[in-house]
Amino acid sequence: MIEIENVSKHFVSRDRDRVAALTNVSLSIRRNEFVCLVGPSGCGKSTLLRLVGGLLPVSQGRVLIDGRPVAEPRAETGIVFQSPTLLPWACVLDNVLFPLKMMKRVTTDSSVRAKRLLKLVGLEGFEGKYPRELSGGMQMRAGICRALVHDPDLLLMDEPFAALDALTREELTLELMRLWREQPKTVLFVTHSIPESVMLADRVVVLSPRPGRVADIVPVEVPRPRRFGMEGLDEFQRPASRIRELIFGTGRSAVH
Amino acid sequence: MAAIAGLFLVWEAACQSFAVPAYLIPAPSAIWKETSALPANVAWHTLVTAKTVLLGFIVSVLVSLPLAVLLTSSPVVAAAIYPLLVLTQAIPKVALAPILVVVLGTSELPRVVVTFLVAFFPLVLSIASGLVSVPPELIELGRACRANRATELWRIRLPYAVPFIFSGLKAAIALAVVGAVVAEFVNADAGLGYLIQTSTAFFKVQLAWGALIILSIMGIVLFQIVVAIERIFFPWSPGIDKPPL
Protein backbone atom coordinates (compact mmCIF):
# COMPACT_ATOMS: atom_id res chain seq x y z
CA MET A 1 0.00 0.00 0.00
CA ILE A 2 2.83 2.41 0.90
CA GLU A 3 5.97 2.56 -1.21
CA ILE A 4 8.82 4.65 0.11
CA GLU A 5 11.39 4.80 -2.68
CA ASN A 6 14.90 6.13 -2.03
CA VAL A 7 13.61 8.95 0.07
CA SER A 8 15.99 11.55 1.45
CA LYS A 9 15.05 14.54 3.52
CA HIS A 10 17.19 17.42 4.64
CA PHE A 11 16.38 20.56 6.53
CA VAL A 12 18.01 23.95 6.21
CA SER A 13 19.04 25.15 9.63
CA ARG A 14 19.15 28.76 10.80
CA ASP A 15 22.77 29.20 9.80
CA ARG A 16 21.87 27.88 6.33
CA ASP A 17 23.56 24.54 6.83
CA ARG A 18 21.92 21.57 5.23
CA VAL A 19 21.12 18.98 7.86
CA ALA A 20 20.33 15.55 6.50
CA ALA A 21 17.55 13.85 8.44
CA LEU A 22 17.00 10.79 6.23
CA THR A 23 19.10 9.33 3.43
CA ASN A 24 17.98 6.78 0.87
CA VAL A 25 15.18 5.22 2.84
CA SER A 26 13.26 2.57 0.98
CA LEU A 27 10.41 0.69 2.55
CA SER A 28 7.30 -1.02 1.41
CA ILE A 29 4.30 -1.51 3.67
CA ARG A 30 1.40 -3.87 2.94
CA ARG A 31 -2.24 -3.00 3.46
CA ASN A 32 -3.40 -3.56 7.06
CA GLU A 33 0.14 -4.17 8.21
CA PHE A 34 1.30 -2.87 11.58
CA VAL A 35 4.78 -1.42 11.20
CA CYS A 36 6.82 0.19 13.97
CA LEU A 37 9.66 2.64 13.37
CA VAL A 38 12.34 2.38 16.03
CA GLY A 39 15.61 4.21 16.35
CA PRO A 40 17.68 6.44 18.60
CA SER A 41 16.35 9.95 19.09
CA GLY A 42 17.12 12.27 16.21
CA CYS A 43 17.24 9.44 13.66
CA GLY A 44 14.40 10.96 11.65
CA LYS A 45 11.62 8.54 12.49
CA SER A 46 9.11 11.32 13.11
CA THR A 47 10.30 12.98 9.92
CA LEU A 48 9.62 9.79 7.96
CA LEU A 49 6.14 9.64 9.48
CA ARG A 50 5.48 13.23 8.40
CA LEU A 51 6.68 12.50 4.88
CA VAL A 52 4.19 9.65 4.65
CA GLY A 53 1.51 11.90 6.14
CA GLY A 54 2.16 14.59 3.55
CA LEU A 55 2.97 17.13 6.27
CA LEU A 56 6.51 17.56 4.93
CA PRO A 57 7.75 17.41 1.34
CA VAL A 58 10.47 14.91 0.44
CA SER A 59 13.83 16.27 -0.70
CA GLN A 60 14.58 13.31 -2.95
CA GLY A 61 12.86 10.09 -3.94
CA ARG A 62 9.14 9.59 -3.58
CA VAL A 63 6.44 8.31 -1.28
CA LEU A 64 3.56 6.52 -2.97
CA ILE A 65 0.31 5.52 -1.32
CA ASP A 66 -1.85 3.24 -3.48
CA GLY A 67 0.37 4.19 -6.39
CA ARG A 68 -0.16 7.92 -6.02
CA PRO A 69 2.65 10.23 -4.87
CA VAL A 70 1.91 11.98 -1.58
CA ALA A 71 1.98 15.75 -2.14
CA GLU A 72 -0.33 16.93 0.64
CA PRO A 73 -2.13 15.34 3.61
CA ARG A 74 -4.58 12.69 2.40
CA ALA A 75 -8.16 12.67 3.60
CA GLU A 76 -7.87 8.93 4.32
CA THR A 77 -4.95 9.25 6.71
CA GLY A 78 -5.40 9.62 10.47
CA ILE A 79 -2.62 11.05 12.61
CA VAL A 80 -2.02 10.68 16.36
CA PHE A 81 0.59 13.05 17.74
CA GLN A 82 2.94 12.66 20.65
CA SER A 83 0.77 14.90 22.83
CA PRO A 84 -3.01 14.54 22.59
CA THR A 85 -3.27 18.05 20.97
CA LEU A 86 -6.93 18.37 21.79
CA LEU A 87 -8.56 21.75 21.27
CA PRO A 88 -9.01 23.22 24.75
CA TRP A 89 -12.13 25.12 23.70
CA ALA A 90 -14.03 22.11 22.37
CA CYS A 91 -15.66 19.28 24.29
CA VAL A 92 -14.46 15.70 23.75
CA LEU A 93 -17.16 14.94 21.16
CA ASP A 94 -16.39 18.09 19.14
CA ASN A 95 -12.69 17.29 19.34
CA VAL A 96 -13.32 13.85 17.88
CA LEU A 97 -15.52 15.35 15.16
CA PHE A 98 -12.91 18.01 14.34
CA PRO A 99 -11.39 16.32 11.24
CA LEU A 100 -14.85 15.80 9.75
CA LYS A 101 -15.75 19.43 10.38
CA MET A 102 -12.51 20.64 8.84
CA MET A 103 -13.04 18.48 5.77
CA LYS A 104 -16.74 19.38 5.64
CA ARG A 105 -17.73 15.75 5.86
CA VAL A 106 -20.09 15.92 8.83
CA THR A 107 -23.17 13.83 8.18
CA THR A 108 -26.12 12.86 10.33
CA ASP A 109 -24.47 9.72 11.64
CA SER A 110 -21.08 11.37 12.31
CA SER A 111 -21.72 11.91 15.97
CA VAL A 112 -23.13 8.40 16.30
CA ARG A 113 -19.87 7.11 14.90
CA ALA A 114 -17.81 9.39 17.15
CA LYS A 115 -19.75 8.23 20.21
CA ARG A 116 -19.27 4.59 19.24
CA LEU A 117 -15.52 5.16 18.97
CA LEU A 118 -15.43 6.89 22.35
CA LYS A 119 -17.34 3.97 23.85
CA LEU A 120 -14.84 1.59 22.30
CA VAL A 121 -11.97 3.26 24.19
CA GLY A 122 -13.91 3.57 27.43
CA LEU A 123 -14.80 7.23 27.20
CA GLU A 124 -18.57 6.75 27.23
CA GLY A 125 -20.17 9.54 29.25
CA PHE A 126 -17.25 11.92 28.73
CA GLU A 127 -18.51 13.31 25.39
CA GLY A 128 -19.42 16.69 26.89
CA LYS A 129 -16.31 17.09 29.04
CA TYR A 130 -13.52 19.50 28.20
CA PRO A 131 -9.96 18.23 27.65
CA ARG A 132 -8.64 19.81 30.86
CA GLU A 133 -11.16 17.71 32.83
CA LEU A 134 -9.57 14.51 31.46
CA SER A 135 -6.46 12.63 32.56
CA GLY A 136 -3.51 12.32 30.18
CA GLY A 137 -4.50 8.79 29.20
CA MET A 138 -8.09 9.78 28.54
CA GLN A 139 -6.94 12.72 26.44
CA MET A 140 -4.79 10.37 24.37
CA ARG A 141 -7.76 8.01 23.92
CA ALA A 142 -9.82 10.94 22.63
CA GLY A 143 -6.92 11.83 20.31
CA ILE A 144 -6.94 8.30 18.92
CA CYS A 145 -10.71 8.47 18.36
CA ARG A 146 -10.18 11.73 16.49
CA ALA A 147 -7.66 10.08 14.21
CA LEU A 148 -10.12 7.25 13.48
CA VAL A 149 -13.36 9.22 13.12
CA HIS A 150 -13.15 9.64 9.34
CA ASP A 151 -12.43 5.90 8.97
CA PRO A 152 -8.93 6.27 7.51
CA ASP A 153 -7.20 3.34 5.84
CA LEU A 154 -3.84 4.55 7.19
CA LEU A 155 -3.09 5.49 10.78
CA LEU A 156 0.13 7.34 11.58
CA MET A 157 1.16 7.44 15.23
CA ASP A 158 4.08 9.54 16.45
CA GLU A 159 5.20 8.20 19.84
CA PRO A 160 1.63 8.47 21.08
CA PHE A 161 2.24 6.78 24.42
CA ALA A 162 5.62 8.33 25.22
CA ALA A 163 4.28 10.89 27.66
CA LEU A 164 2.02 8.48 29.56
CA ASP A 165 2.75 6.57 32.74
CA ALA A 166 3.71 2.91 32.42
CA LEU A 167 0.33 1.48 33.45
CA THR A 168 -1.72 3.69 31.14
CA ARG A 169 0.76 2.89 28.43
CA GLU A 170 0.18 -0.86 28.72
CA GLU A 171 -3.56 -0.34 28.82
CA LEU A 172 -3.53 1.79 25.68
CA THR A 173 -1.22 -0.64 23.90
CA LEU A 174 -3.79 -3.39 24.43
CA GLU A 175 -6.63 -1.13 23.36
CA LEU A 176 -4.81 -0.13 20.22
CA MET A 177 -4.25 -3.78 19.29
CA ARG A 178 -7.94 -4.50 19.89
CA LEU A 179 -9.01 -1.51 17.76
CA TRP A 180 -6.69 -2.60 15.00
CA ARG A 181 -8.07 -6.16 15.09
CA GLU A 182 -11.67 -4.92 14.97
CA GLN A 183 -11.06 -2.26 12.32
CA PRO A 184 -8.01 -3.38 10.37
CA LYS A 185 -5.97 -0.60 8.81
CA THR A 186 -2.38 0.09 7.94
CA VAL A 187 -0.55 1.48 10.97
CA LEU A 188 2.81 3.21 10.99
CA PHE A 189 3.85 3.64 14.62
CA VAL A 190 6.91 5.59 15.77
CA THR A 191 8.36 4.66 19.14
CA HIS A 192 11.66 4.62 20.98
CA SER A 193 10.62 1.66 23.11
CA ILE A 194 11.89 -1.69 21.86
CA PRO A 195 9.40 -3.82 23.86
CA GLU A 196 6.54 -1.63 22.71
CA SER A 197 7.54 -2.03 19.07
CA VAL A 198 7.80 -5.83 19.37
CA MET A 199 4.51 -6.04 21.22
CA LEU A 200 2.65 -4.10 18.53
CA ALA A 201 4.30 -4.69 15.20
CA ASP A 202 4.22 -7.21 12.39
CA ARG A 203 7.55 -5.77 11.32
CA VAL A 204 9.89 -3.38 13.10
CA VAL A 205 11.87 -0.98 10.94
CA VAL A 206 15.09 -0.05 12.73
CA LEU A 207 16.60 3.28 11.71
CA SER A 208 20.26 4.13 12.21
CA PRO A 209 21.35 7.38 13.92
CA ARG A 210 21.27 10.65 11.98
CA PRO A 211 21.11 10.77 9.10
CA GLY A 212 18.51 8.03 9.32
CA ARG A 213 18.85 4.99 7.10
CA VAL A 214 17.04 1.69 7.36
CA ALA A 215 19.43 -0.45 9.40
CA ASP A 216 17.24 -3.51 9.07
CA ILE A 217 13.67 -4.66 9.07
CA VAL A 218 12.90 -7.17 11.82
CA PRO A 219 9.81 -9.38 11.46
CA VAL A 220 7.94 -10.23 14.66
CA GLU A 221 6.20 -13.60 14.83
CA VAL A 222 4.65 -13.41 18.27
CA PRO A 223 1.18 -14.98 17.82
CA ARG A 224 -1.85 -12.70 18.01
CA PRO A 225 -3.84 -11.80 20.01
CA ARG A 226 -0.89 -10.57 22.02
CA ARG A 227 -0.95 -9.63 25.67
CA PHE A 228 1.51 -8.55 28.30
CA GLY A 229 3.25 -11.55 29.82
CA MET A 230 4.36 -12.74 26.39
CA GLU A 231 7.65 -10.88 26.70
CA GLY A 232 9.31 -14.07 27.91
CA LEU A 233 8.47 -15.97 24.75
CA ASP A 234 11.28 -16.84 22.43
CA GLU A 235 9.35 -15.26 19.55
CA PHE A 236 9.41 -12.01 21.54
CA GLN A 237 12.98 -12.16 22.79
CA ARG A 238 14.61 -12.89 19.44
CA PRO A 239 13.39 -9.81 17.55
CA ALA A 240 13.85 -7.66 20.68
CA SER A 241 17.51 -8.54 21.07
CA ARG A 242 18.05 -8.25 17.32
CA ILE A 243 16.67 -4.68 17.43
CA ARG A 244 18.83 -3.90 20.45
CA GLU A 245 21.87 -5.15 18.58
CA LEU A 246 21.06 -3.01 15.58
CA ILE A 247 20.73 0.10 17.72
CA PHE A 248 23.50 -0.36 20.28
CA GLY A 249 25.84 -2.83 18.55
CA THR A 250 26.49 -6.41 19.65
CA GLY A 251 28.37 -5.52 22.83
CA ARG A 252 25.36 -4.01 24.60
CA SER A 253 22.86 -6.79 23.98
CA ALA A 254 24.62 -9.15 26.42
CA VAL A 255 24.16 -6.76 29.35
CA HIS A 256 21.22 -7.59 31.58
CA MET B 1 -14.93 45.67 48.42
CA ALA B 2 -14.32 45.70 52.17
CA ALA B 3 -10.90 47.21 51.57
CA ILE B 4 -12.39 50.03 49.51
CA ALA B 5 -15.09 50.70 52.12
CA GLY B 6 -12.36 50.74 54.80
CA LEU B 7 -10.36 53.24 52.76
CA PHE B 8 -13.33 55.61 52.62
CA LEU B 9 -13.91 55.26 56.39
CA VAL B 10 -10.29 56.09 57.21
CA TRP B 11 -10.38 58.96 54.72
CA GLU B 12 -13.54 60.39 56.29
CA ALA B 13 -12.19 60.01 59.83
CA ALA B 14 -8.86 61.63 58.91
CA CYS B 15 -10.55 64.59 57.24
CA GLN B 16 -12.82 65.13 60.26
CA SER B 17 -10.19 64.76 62.98
CA PHE B 18 -7.37 66.73 61.33
CA ALA B 19 -9.67 69.37 59.84
CA VAL B 20 -8.11 69.10 56.39
CA PRO B 21 -9.18 72.10 54.28
CA ALA B 22 -11.85 71.06 51.75
CA TYR B 23 -9.93 72.53 48.79
CA LEU B 24 -6.98 70.21 49.53
CA ILE B 25 -8.72 66.91 50.20
CA PRO B 26 -12.46 67.02 50.80
CA ALA B 27 -14.07 64.41 53.04
CA PRO B 28 -16.07 61.65 51.30
CA SER B 29 -19.26 62.92 52.89
CA ALA B 30 -18.67 66.38 51.42
CA ILE B 31 -17.88 64.88 48.03
CA TRP B 32 -21.08 62.86 48.14
CA LYS B 33 -23.16 65.87 49.20
CA GLU B 34 -21.81 68.07 46.42
CA THR B 35 -21.89 65.42 43.71
CA SER B 36 -25.39 64.17 44.46
CA ALA B 37 -26.79 67.71 44.57
CA LEU B 38 -27.34 67.70 40.81
CA PRO B 39 -27.89 64.03 39.99
CA ALA B 40 -29.27 64.57 36.49
CA ASN B 41 -26.36 66.79 35.59
CA VAL B 42 -23.71 64.36 36.87
CA ALA B 43 -25.48 61.42 35.24
CA TRP B 44 -25.46 63.30 31.94
CA HIS B 45 -21.71 63.90 32.14
CA THR B 46 -21.16 60.26 33.07
CA LEU B 47 -23.17 59.04 30.09
CA VAL B 48 -21.29 61.32 27.71
CA THR B 49 -17.94 59.96 28.92
CA ALA B 50 -19.19 56.36 28.89
CA LYS B 51 -20.27 56.82 25.28
CA THR B 52 -16.81 58.07 24.26
CA VAL B 53 -15.12 55.24 26.17
CA LEU B 54 -17.31 52.59 24.55
CA LEU B 55 -17.05 54.02 21.04
CA GLY B 56 -13.27 54.26 21.36
CA PHE B 57 -13.12 50.73 22.75
CA ILE B 58 -15.31 49.31 19.98
CA VAL B 59 -13.21 51.03 17.31
CA SER B 60 -10.09 49.61 19.00
CA VAL B 61 -11.49 46.09 18.79
CA LEU B 62 -12.64 46.50 15.19
CA VAL B 63 -9.23 47.81 14.13
CA SER B 64 -7.04 45.58 16.30
CA LEU B 65 -8.43 42.21 15.21
CA PRO B 66 -7.76 42.55 11.47
CA LEU B 67 -4.54 44.43 12.19
CA ALA B 68 -3.24 41.59 14.37
CA VAL B 69 -4.23 39.02 11.74
CA LEU B 70 -2.39 41.09 9.13
CA LEU B 71 0.67 41.49 11.37
CA THR B 72 0.95 37.75 11.90
CA SER B 73 0.12 36.77 8.31
CA SER B 74 3.60 37.29 6.88
CA PRO B 75 6.97 38.67 8.00
CA VAL B 76 6.96 41.15 5.11
CA VAL B 77 3.62 42.66 6.12
CA ALA B 78 4.72 42.72 9.75
CA ALA B 79 7.92 44.55 8.85
CA ALA B 80 5.88 47.13 6.94
CA ILE B 81 3.20 47.75 9.57
CA TYR B 82 5.07 47.39 12.82
CA PRO B 83 7.11 50.63 12.65
CA LEU B 84 3.89 52.56 11.94
CA LEU B 85 2.28 50.97 14.99
CA VAL B 86 5.20 51.92 17.18
CA LEU B 87 5.02 55.45 15.77
CA THR B 88 1.39 55.80 16.86
CA GLN B 89 2.50 54.82 20.35
CA ALA B 90 5.51 57.14 20.39
CA ILE B 91 3.32 60.21 19.78
CA PRO B 92 2.17 61.66 23.11
CA LYS B 93 -1.62 61.50 22.90
CA VAL B 94 -2.08 64.54 25.13
CA ALA B 95 -0.06 66.56 22.64
CA LEU B 96 -1.88 65.07 19.70
CA ALA B 97 -5.37 65.74 21.01
CA PRO B 98 -5.50 69.53 20.32
CA ILE B 99 -4.05 68.99 16.85
CA LEU B 100 -6.70 66.36 16.13
CA VAL B 101 -9.38 68.86 17.14
CA VAL B 102 -8.08 71.27 14.54
CA VAL B 103 -8.00 68.53 11.92
CA LEU B 104 -11.24 66.74 12.75
CA GLY B 105 -13.35 69.53 14.22
CA THR B 106 -14.87 69.94 17.67
CA SER B 107 -17.18 66.96 17.38
CA GLU B 108 -17.18 63.61 19.13
CA LEU B 109 -14.82 62.28 16.48
CA PRO B 110 -11.45 63.55 17.82
CA ARG B 111 -12.37 62.26 21.30
CA VAL B 112 -13.10 58.78 19.93
CA VAL B 113 -9.91 58.86 17.89
CA VAL B 114 -7.79 59.80 20.92
CA THR B 115 -9.50 57.10 23.01
CA PHE B 116 -8.81 54.59 20.27
CA LEU B 117 -5.17 55.65 19.93
CA VAL B 118 -4.61 55.25 23.66
CA ALA B 119 -6.42 51.91 23.93
CA PHE B 120 -5.71 49.85 20.84
CA PHE B 121 -1.97 49.15 21.00
CA PRO B 122 -1.87 46.57 23.83
CA LEU B 123 -4.89 44.91 22.23
CA VAL B 124 -3.11 44.47 18.89
CA LEU B 125 -0.04 43.11 20.64
CA SER B 126 -1.91 40.56 22.73
CA ILE B 127 -4.07 39.36 19.85
CA ALA B 128 -0.97 39.02 17.66
CA SER B 129 0.95 37.11 20.33
CA GLY B 130 -2.07 34.83 20.81
CA LEU B 131 -2.23 34.11 17.09
CA VAL B 132 1.44 33.17 16.87
CA SER B 133 1.68 31.17 20.09
CA VAL B 134 -0.52 28.34 18.81
CA PRO B 135 1.45 25.11 19.47
CA PRO B 136 2.96 23.76 16.22
CA GLU B 137 1.18 20.45 16.81
CA LEU B 138 -2.23 22.13 16.58
CA ILE B 139 -1.16 23.75 13.31
CA GLU B 140 -0.03 20.32 12.10
CA LEU B 141 -3.36 18.87 13.12
CA GLY B 142 -5.08 21.53 11.04
CA ARG B 143 -2.88 20.72 8.07
CA ALA B 144 -3.50 17.00 8.49
CA CYS B 145 -7.21 17.85 8.32
CA ARG B 146 -6.53 19.67 5.06
CA ALA B 147 -7.33 23.12 6.42
CA ASN B 148 -6.54 26.14 4.27
CA ARG B 149 -5.21 29.33 5.89
CA ALA B 150 -8.62 30.88 6.41
CA THR B 151 -10.01 27.78 8.13
CA GLU B 152 -6.84 27.47 10.16
CA LEU B 153 -7.26 31.07 11.34
CA TRP B 154 -10.93 30.70 12.11
CA ARG B 155 -10.93 27.19 13.60
CA ILE B 156 -7.55 27.05 15.32
CA ARG B 157 -5.63 30.32 15.66
CA LEU B 158 -8.46 32.63 16.72
CA PRO B 159 -10.03 30.29 19.29
CA TYR B 160 -6.57 29.57 20.66
CA ALA B 161 -5.95 33.32 20.99
CA VAL B 162 -9.14 33.96 23.00
CA PRO B 163 -7.43 34.12 26.43
CA PHE B 164 -4.81 36.46 24.94
CA ILE B 165 -7.51 38.57 23.27
CA PHE B 166 -9.28 38.99 26.58
CA SER B 167 -6.13 39.96 28.38
CA GLY B 168 -5.74 42.66 25.72
CA LEU B 169 -9.40 43.69 26.04
CA LYS B 170 -8.95 44.16 29.78
CA ALA B 171 -5.97 46.45 29.23
CA ALA B 172 -7.80 48.26 26.42
CA ILE B 173 -10.97 49.00 28.39
CA ALA B 174 -8.95 50.47 31.26
CA LEU B 175 -6.92 52.59 28.86
CA ALA B 176 -10.05 53.68 26.99
CA VAL B 177 -11.24 55.48 30.14
CA VAL B 178 -7.89 57.27 30.34
CA GLY B 179 -8.06 58.17 26.65
CA ALA B 180 -11.58 59.56 26.88
CA VAL B 181 -10.70 61.82 29.82
CA VAL B 182 -7.55 63.08 28.08
CA ALA B 183 -9.65 63.93 25.05
CA GLU B 184 -12.26 65.69 27.17
CA PHE B 185 -9.62 67.81 28.85
CA VAL B 186 -8.68 69.18 25.46
CA ASN B 187 -11.99 69.53 23.76
CA ALA B 188 -15.41 68.90 25.25
CA ASP B 189 -18.53 70.65 26.44
CA ALA B 190 -19.66 67.69 28.50
CA GLY B 191 -18.26 64.55 30.15
CA LEU B 192 -16.55 63.78 33.44
CA GLY B 193 -13.17 65.05 32.21
CA TYR B 194 -14.85 68.32 31.26
CA LEU B 195 -16.61 68.35 34.65
CA ILE B 196 -13.31 67.99 36.50
CA GLN B 197 -11.76 70.84 34.54
CA THR B 198 -14.65 73.26 34.95
CA SER B 199 -15.30 72.47 38.60
CA THR B 200 -11.65 72.90 39.60
CA ALA B 201 -11.62 76.17 37.67
CA PHE B 202 -14.44 77.34 39.93
CA PHE B 203 -12.90 75.79 43.08
CA LYS B 204 -15.72 73.26 43.34
CA VAL B 205 -13.16 70.71 44.47
CA GLN B 206 -15.73 68.31 45.94
CA LEU B 207 -17.42 67.95 42.56
CA ALA B 208 -14.07 67.29 40.86
CA TRP B 209 -13.35 64.55 43.36
CA GLY B 210 -16.82 63.15 42.82
CA ALA B 211 -16.21 62.99 39.06
CA LEU B 212 -12.87 61.30 39.70
CA ILE B 213 -14.53 58.64 41.85
CA ILE B 214 -17.23 58.06 39.25
CA LEU B 215 -14.50 57.61 36.63
CA SER B 216 -12.79 55.00 38.79
CA ILE B 217 -16.08 53.17 39.32
CA MET B 218 -16.73 53.29 35.58
CA GLY B 219 -13.30 51.78 34.94
CA ILE B 220 -13.89 48.98 37.44
CA VAL B 221 -17.39 48.20 36.15
CA LEU B 222 -16.32 48.11 32.50
CA PHE B 223 -13.34 45.92 33.38
CA GLN B 224 -15.59 43.52 35.28
CA ILE B 225 -18.00 43.39 32.33
CA VAL B 226 -15.13 42.22 30.12
CA VAL B 227 -14.17 39.62 32.74
CA ALA B 228 -17.79 38.43 32.95
CA ILE B 229 -18.08 38.13 29.16
CA GLU B 230 -14.99 35.96 29.13
CA ARG B 231 -16.30 33.72 31.92
CA ILE B 232 -19.77 33.35 30.42
CA PHE B 233 -18.93 32.87 26.75
CA PHE B 234 -15.50 31.26 27.02
CA PRO B 235 -15.64 29.18 30.19
CA TRP B 236 -12.72 27.04 28.99
CA SER B 237 -10.45 30.08 28.87
CA PRO B 238 -8.01 29.91 31.77
CA GLY B 239 -8.22 33.71 32.18
CA ILE B 240 -4.47 34.13 32.18
CA ASP B 241 -4.69 37.22 34.35
CA LYS B 242 -7.74 36.53 36.46
CA PRO B 243 -8.03 39.32 39.06
CA PRO B 244 -8.70 38.40 42.68
CA LEU B 245 -11.85 40.56 42.73
Image (cartoon, coloured by chain):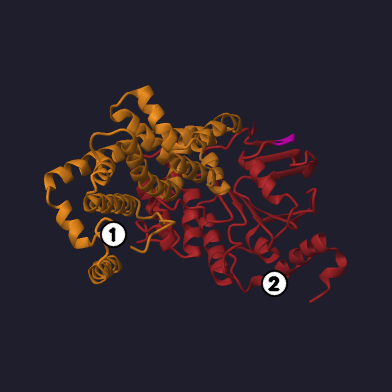
Chain colours: A red, B orange
Q: Residue furthest bottom?
A: A256
Residue at position x 80%, y 60% in the image: A247
Q: Nearer the viewer, residue A153 or B24?
A: B24
- In-image side of B221 versus A170 (left or right): left
Q: Residue A113, labelled with which disc?
A: none
Q: Residue A233, labelled with which disc?
A: 2
What residue is shown with label 1?
Answer: B25
The nearer-to-camera label among 1 and 2 is 1
- In-image side of B149 versus B221 (left or right): right
Q: Quadrant of residue B231?
A: bottom left
Secondary element at tag 1: loop
Q: Is residue A56 visible?
A: yes
Secondary element at tag 2: loop
Residue at position x 65%, y 39% in the image: A56
Q: Which residues are magenta?
A: A58-62
Q: Quadrant of residue B98?
A: top left
Determine the chain carrying the residue at label 2: A
Q: Which quadrant is home to the C terminus of chain A?
A: bottom right
- In-image side of B40 versus B118 (left or right): left
**Residue contact at pointers 1 and 2, CB within 8 angstroms:** no
Gap between marks 1 and 2 measured at Cα: 88 Å
Q: Which amino acid type is marked by label 1?
A: Ile
Residue at position x 59%, y 63% in the image: A163
Residue A123 locus on image (x, y percent): 41, 61
Residue B74 locus on image (x, y percent): 57, 32
Q: Quadrant of residue B139?
A: top right
Prevailing SS of the magenta stretch: strand
Bin the neighbour count of mark 1 within 10 Å (Cα to Cα): few under 14, some 14-19, many 20 and up. Answer: some
Q: Which amino acid type is marked by label 2?
A: Leu
- In-image side of A95 versus B195 (left or right): right
Q: Which quadrant is home to the N terminus of chain A?
A: top right
Whether residue A151 appears in magenta in the rendering, the answer is no
